[in-house]
Image (cartoon, rainbow, N blue to C red):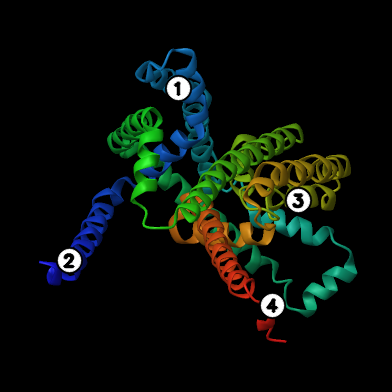
């Protein structure tokens, strides 16, 4: 029996690996649903604990109250904004198709308003082919708006699938919030690592998830809201749509909402609307930019302890690989990567100290 123990153990680990991969394939269609259900449960877990403490450990009732709070704070506002956004996307797509919203013409006006010296430089590098550039810009804008409108229409057509995924997420959220501590304890006990390593990695995992979601989302919402209000004040149509675009771009540190408000400010200045252009540029630099520079290090960088360039690259890589979910998973993988190598460095350092400590004569120098 003892002689077959290594074989049995190897077979068991193989079985464990196979069933784990099989479960991943089974859950793959609901990847986003499971991910965001778990993320929301992790974020609202402190709320659940406070409610449980006040209700005398009535966990089911506390979980229902936590779910209601999540719906009021997160789900309902997102649903209202999404409905309005879909309407504005359809309106923008209709304008592009009708030709009333011509990005190529806007670009042409900006180029003609530039000083002659700059126009000469552009001509030297063959960048003054305005009809060709105008046609490409207009075609690109039409393709982008058509893609967004198609996605919105697809979402409307897949209403049943969306409702099912939404209900599954709320169902999963309820049980993860209610039984979060027990599930966390089971996962922690099952991980075949040293206890100190498990504690460090789980703490880092929790910290990065909360900081990335809460910090990045707060920064994005604030910047998108301020940017949308600024564009509405200067008379830009579809301010909610552009505010939402700025919110998405704000998820990228160091890039952010300036990709929207800066070209608009340049357009106003180049076409003679100096008050609007300079005002928008000052507001974007002093207010929207300050939000990113002040809030992001406090809410994200301070907790994750990741350099901005690591957050930027891992966020871009995550989004390019798995879509919008990558803005959470990318920095999470980067943080766990750095933490794992840091643990290895500490272990090697501790082992080195342990060898050298008994005898001072072993100094290699």
Instruction: Give the Cα distance between marks 2 and 4.
Output: 47 Å
Counting residues from the N terminus, which is met first, the one under dot 3 or under dot 4?
3
Q: Position of residue 359 (x, y in %)?
A: 65, 76
Q: Mark 1 points at which residue?
A: 66
Counting residues from the N terminus, which is met first, the one under dot 1 or under dot 2?
2
Counting residues from the N terminus, which is met first, the one under dot 3 or under dot 2?
2
Q: Is residue 317 left or right of residue 193?
A: right
Q: Mark 1 touching mark 4, by CB under 8 A?
A: no
Above-or-below relation of 86 to 116: above
Q: Name the residue under label 4.
A: 360
Q: Mark 3 points at which residue?
A: 262
Q: Residue 11 carries which label?
A: 2
Q: Position of residue 84 (x, y in %)?
A: 52, 30
Instruction: Give the Cα distance between marks 1 and 3.
Output: 41 Å
Q: In this view, does 38 lie to the left or right of 72?
A: left
Q: Is residue 40 left or right of residue 361?
A: left
């Amino acid at each position: 029996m003892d002689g077959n123990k290594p074989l049995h153990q190897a077979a068991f680990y193989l079985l464990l690996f196979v069933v784990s991969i099989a479960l991943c394939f089974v859950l793959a269609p609901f990847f986003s649903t499971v991910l965001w259900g778990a993320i929301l449960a992790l974020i609202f877990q402190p709320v659940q604990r406070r409610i449980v403490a006040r209700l005398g450990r009535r966990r089911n009732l506390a979980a229902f109250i936590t779910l209601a709070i999540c719906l009021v704070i997160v789900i309902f506002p997102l649903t209202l904004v999404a409905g309005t956004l879909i309407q504005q996307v359809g309106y923008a797509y209709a304008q592009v198709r009708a030709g009333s919203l011509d990005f190529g013409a806007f670009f042409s006006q900006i180029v003609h308003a530039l000083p002659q010296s700059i126009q000469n430089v552009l001509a030297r590098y063959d960048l003054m082919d305005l009809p060709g550039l105008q046609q490409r810009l207009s075609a690109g804008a039409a393709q982008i708006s058509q893609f967004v409108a198609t996605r919105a229409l697809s979402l409307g057509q897949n209403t049943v699938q969306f409702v099912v995924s939404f209900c599954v997420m709320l169902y999963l959220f309820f049980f993860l919030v209610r039984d979060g501590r027990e599930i966390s304890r089971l996962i922690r006990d099952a991980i075949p690592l040293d206890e100190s390593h498990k504690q460090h990695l789980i703490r880092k995992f929790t910290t990065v998830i909360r900081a990335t979601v809460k910090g990045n989302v707060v920064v994005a919402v604030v910047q998108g809201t301020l940017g949308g209000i600024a564009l509405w004040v200067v008379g830009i149509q579809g301010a909610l749509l552009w505010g939402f675009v700025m919110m998405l771009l704000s998820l990228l540190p160091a890039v952010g909402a300036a990709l929207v408000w800066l070209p608009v400010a340049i357009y106003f200045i180049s076409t003679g609307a100096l008050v609007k252009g300079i005002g928008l540029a000052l507001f974007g630099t002093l207010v929207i930019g300050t939000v990113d520079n002040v809030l992001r290090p406090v809410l994200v960088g301070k907790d994750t302890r990741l350099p901005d360039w690591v957050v930027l690259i891992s966020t871009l890589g995550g989004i390019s690989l798995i879509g919008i979910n990558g803005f959470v998973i990318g920095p999470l993988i980067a943080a766990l990567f750095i933490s794992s190598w840091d643990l290895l460095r500490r272990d090697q350092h501790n082992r080195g100290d342990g060898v050298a400590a008994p005898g001072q004569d072993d100094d290699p120098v």
